[in-house]
Image (cartoon, rainbow, N blue to C red):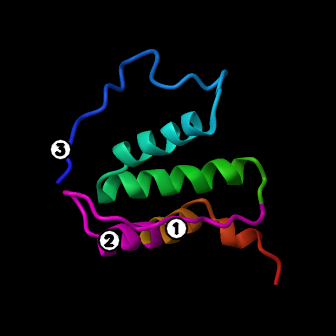
Amino acid sequence: MRKQTQPNYQSSNLINFSNFRSLSECFDVFKLAHDLVDCVEAVKIATENVIREFSEDNVIYLELRSTPRSTERMSKLDCLQAIIDAIKWVLQKYQLLDHIPN
């Protein structure tokens, strides 16, 4: 079993967004996101932030893709339910469905 380690998020050299040199460096961003989003509350926050930010950019169609995963703090089902709950909550909170024509 892989040993769980806490990433050093304080490091100023964690990810250099202005100078990606390889595709593998881009995937480092995904690893960081996976390390941060390891419980139901984090999944809900991340889901809300994604939807809200796209809405603020006036995006009218958004396809969210995720692979539910289990961690020490949540099951795959918990992860999936958190995504569904967050989508429902953010659509209601920001009244996003009110803007969809019939």
Q: Secondary structure at mark 2?
A: helix
What residue did someone put label 3 on?
3
Magenta region? 60-84
Q: Tell me the mark number nearer the camera, choosing from 2 and 3.
A: 3
Q: Residues within 10 Å of mark 3 (few under 14, many from 20)?
A: few
What residue did someone put label 1 on?
87
Q: Secondary structure at mark 1?
A: helix
What residue did someone put label 2 on?
76
> As shown in the figure, which amino acid type bears the numbered disc 2?
Lys
Residue at 78% x, 63% y: name it.
60
Give the distance between the C-alpha atoms of the residues marked 2 and 3, in whole angstroms. 20 Å
Picture quadrant of residue 81: bottom left
User: Could you tell which of marks 3 and 1 lies nearer the N-terminus?
Assistant: 3
What predominant SS class does the magenta segment belong to?
A: loop
In x, y percent, where is residue 80? 40, 72
In x, y percent, where is residue 8? 31, 25
> As shown in the figure, which amino acid type bears the numbered disc 1?
Ile
Residue at 43% x, 43% y: name it.
31
Residue at 20% x, 43% y: name it.
4
In x, y percent, where is residue 79? 35, 67
